[in-house]
Image (cartoon, coloured by chain):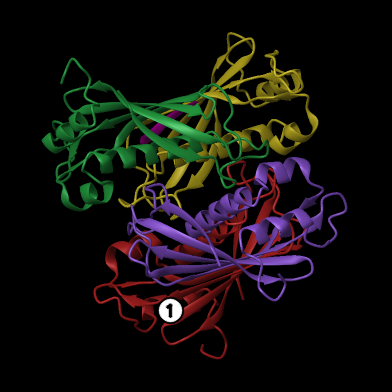
Chain colours: A red, B yellow, C green, D purple
Amino acid sequence: MSFVYHSRVRFSEVDGASIAYFSRVFEHCHAAYEELLAAAGLPLREVLDTKDWVMPLVHAEADYREPLRLGDALRIEASVERMGATSLTFLYRVLGEEGRLRAEVRLVHVVLDKASFRPRALDESLLAGLERLGLLPQETA
Amino acid sequence: MSFVYHSRVRFSEVDGASIAYFSRVFEHCHAAYEELLAAAGLPLREVLDTKDWVMPLVHAEADYREPLRLGDALRIEASVERMGATSLTFLYRVLGEEGRLRAEVRLVHVVLDKASFRPRALDESLLAGLERLGLLPQETA
Amino acid sequence: MSFVYHSRVRFSEVDGASIAYFSRVFEHCHAAYEELLAAAGLPLREVLDTKDWVMPLVHAEADYREPLRLGDALRIEASVERMGATSLTFLYRVLGEEGRLRAEVRLVHVVLDKASFRPRALDESLLAGLERLGLLPQETA
Amino acid sequence: MSFVYHSRVRFSEVDGASIAYFSRVFEHCHAAYEELLAAAGLPLREVLDTKDWVMPLVHAEADYREPLRLGDALRIEASVERMGATSLTFLYRVLGEEGRLRAEVRLVHVVLDKASFRPRALDESLLAGLERLGLLPQETA
């Protein structure tokens, strides 16, 4: 199961070769994450303002398969690739309109207590939201 | 008449106060311009790749009325504010979901011959596209 | 008198024509502002963390004279163009290595009380810092 | 051996927590790469304009160890981690002023013929430049 987000490559993102500068794909995937959180009932602004936990990134990686060109419509399929006791890895498959894989992005978050900055378990509200979206990996659901 | 574009304030755009860094609003407005061009039958990539004219910016300005916060849905109303012999000024009214004006942006383009970089008249294809969208100012339409 | 800041046009900033995307010049000028503040004894992070005032932008504008190309070394000359009771306008002249004016940027800040968000007078610490840098307009110094 | 580049975390880069948005570190490292290329006698603009090869990224990754805060001075140590027949991996160690490792970034480039987009061997001019900077891995130097 995956959560789908649509976006488009903008002129502000392309480089001298009219293809998206490599790190822009991370911004698109994080936007997908923000929509996913909102759909899970946990808009990022609300999380930042009201929760006692934060979920910073400890690792980010991208494999580039085909260029993202100016104006290209993107379909980003976000899924939970791995769920640890205190961490969560999202996989983002970035596809072109024609369905070909353009990039694959992995973002690894850890859950920290906001006050102590010590690792803590994934919040129940997050797990419930991910389950509602059908995103909990089968082995843990 | 205006052309309407919808977007959202992303985490990549906000600063330490959780409001959009000031220059990001220009990126949203340029994205609106890209959609407007596409709707006018002149997608920017096609213009760049196939036309013998370019339309660079000579002036950009923004008046900030109210903050754009993380997650805010934006409604951008683009209109042609002024049409000169060889220039074109777009006005972008950036509204929040609740309808209040958040920012007003003006982008002034000049039309240049791609080879000589000398000013030239607005292309007929552009005028026709703007007219189809109802964006030609009354006095010139 | 002006405060001078040096930077360079990066690959992340250029568009399909290998010239800097128009809003990037605002980022360079704001970086100059950050260095200016630090030189004035008021690093921005310290201002945000410890002062009871903030200085958001209410207006930003740029006039583009010549393209900023990939790799170009920039010399940015920042000066105070206008000082009102509760506002401050900085002018940034963006020059190429060869000394030609590439862009002129104006950023208008207002001073607000951090708690009430009501306008207030420019802080003494800021005035003293600007004076030390020789940036106070003669009529007010 | 490594090539050292200095930069600073800007207000345009920090997020709501006043720490750099995760993908900005890639932009800093690519700026280090651009300086490295220039020092090797191959400024990126010249490469793009005059060479018959390109060196796009096929993989990018970052491990985040400690936050990059607004105003932090960064010292980026770039080195060649791996040199394949048609690929090149740079490692960027991003350190704070105090010397602690903040992030580790790896960028994997492939060398392609500009016309055919087929893989080809690293150019002699690049190898010579890297050797002059002392960046060629010992086993291959």
Please identify the quadrant where the C terminus of chain C is shown: top left
Q: Amino acid at mark 1?
A: Ala
C43 to the left or right of A102:
left
For the question of whether residue A17 can be seen, the reply is no
Q: Residue C139 versus residue A117: which sits nearer the camera? A: C139
Q: How many discs mark residues in the rendered view?
A: 1
B13 to the left or right of A28:
left
Q: Quadrant of residue D134?
A: bottom right
Q: Is residue C90 magenta?
A: no
Q: Residues within 10 Å of mark 1 (few under 14, many from 20)?
A: some
For the question of whether residue A60 can be seen, the reply is yes
Residue extent of the magenta highlight? B100-106
Q: Residue at x 14, y 35 (%)?
A: C123
Q: Residue at x 78, y 24 (%)?
A: B52
Please identify the quadrant where the N terminus of chain C is shown: top left
Q: Residue at x 65, y 38 (%)?
A: C18
Q: With respect to residue D68, does B98 lie above or below?
A: above
Q: Residue at x 37, y 42 (%)?
A: B98
